[in-house]
Image (cartoon, rainbow, N blue to C red):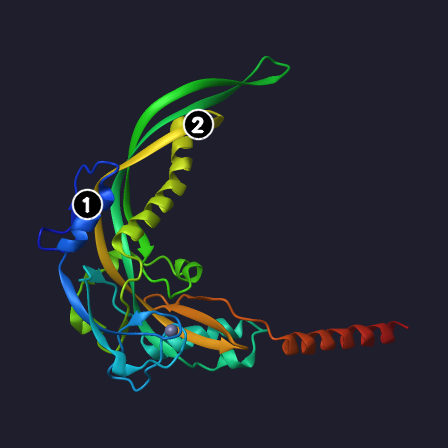
Amino acid sequence: MNKGSKKDIAKKVNSVDELDYFEFLENAEASADEIVLQTVKCNNCNASTTVDTSSTNNACPYCGDKLVIGNLKPESVIKPWGLIPFRLDKTEAIASYKKWIRKRWFTPSLFSEVKNFQGVYIPYWTFDTSANIQFIGERGDEYSDGERVYMLWTDVIDEVQWYFDDVLICASDAVNESAINELRPWGTESLVPFEDEYLKGHISQKYEIDLKMGFHKAQDKITDGIEALLRGHIGGDDQKILKARTSYTDITFKHILLPVYIIAHDFKGKPYQIIINGKTGKVEGKVPKSLAKIGVVLASVLTLVSLSLWFLI
Ligand SMILES: [Zn+2]
């Protein structure tokens, strides 16, 4: 992946001391190129989004609440380094959704309608970083004396360094996190340099998770992967990790936008979001079950069972 020149928004922080990297990120954020977005804050879910000026539908893409266009105000944000353009048009995205919802038999009929449907560029951070890990652990090797199997434990004190590339962190908290994480893979090789033109006809959102918070989340993600890596590094038949200390160097970040379509439903006073990957058509989201539909199916099954019993008698 292109690491970006000085001109790019990608910022590089070299050999940052463990305790200072957030300060470095703060400085990098302050010196980054910015663009101004005209955004409006949703009174219901608090998301700050732009509005699609080519549409008369001025509803919040996340919850479907009406947006007060008179409240549009300019906001400076870090200029996106790049984005993945929408590959599916609205008709194709709706077709993906209809195919998906048809397989969910017990979903209330309301969900067959496509209301509050909008294309949104979701803000993301992507981080590259080296992680230096000093650790104390134990390696267990099994051996047998012919009768019993024993575990022989050996102390391991070591230092390793791994490079983590493209750690992707969603910077929106208006979108359902577990659902949007399921929209992968995005294929960051499809990223193109950012141009204002791409935003026309779509909504974009201001990041709510700032750069520092984003790197916090990236660290959590990296930490989750480190344990398995350390176990592989220690080797043997079993491993213990007693202490590990991680520091990060060569941190780079990019602010990018990824394309999704969102359908926001309100059912019995509860909001439901269904999101569609605007590049691949993959659909994710939770939908409620209709008790009436389940009742109809149960009644049919019971009728069939009683009919077959009748024939057996
Ligand atoms: Zn909203």
Relative to 1, residue 113 above or below: below
Q: Position of residue 13 (x, y in %)?
A: 17, 43
- The answer to whether 301 appears left or right of 239 in the picture is right
Helix, strand or loop for disc 2:
strand
Q: Where is residue 79 in the image (x, y as percent from the top left)?
A: 17, 62
Relative to 92, residue 222 above or below: above
| Ligand 1's quadrant | bottom left
- One can see residue 243 in this view: yes
Q: Mark 2 points at which residue?
A: 242
* Structural crowding at the residue carrying mark 2, measured as other residues with C-alpha within 10 Å and reported as few (<14), some (14–19) or many (≥20): few
Single out the residue that lies furthest toward the right: 313
**Which mark is drawn over residue 55?**
none
Sequence-wise first label, 1 or 2 = 1
Q: Position of residue 37 (x, y in %)?
A: 20, 71
Relative to 204, residue 2 above or below: above
Amino acid type of the residue tagged 2 in the rendering: Leu
Helix, strand or loop for disc 1:
helix
Q: Residue at x 47, y 74 (%)?
A: 99
Q: Residue at x 62, y 16 (%)?
A: 148
Q: Residue at x 35, y 43 (%)?
A: 222
Q: Image quadrant of residue 68? A: bottom left
Q: Name the residue under label 1.
A: 24
Q: How far apart are marks 1 and 2 (CA)?
A: 30 Å
Q: Image quadrant of residue 80? A: bottom left
Q: Where is residue 246 in the image (x, y as percent from the top left)?
A: 32, 34
Relative to 41, residue 164 above or below: above
Q: Image quadrant of residue 194? A: bottom left
* Structural crowding at the residue carrying mark 1, measured as other residues with C-alpha within 10 Å and reported as few (<14), some (14–19) or many (≥20): some
Q: In which quarter of the image is the C terminus?
A: bottom right
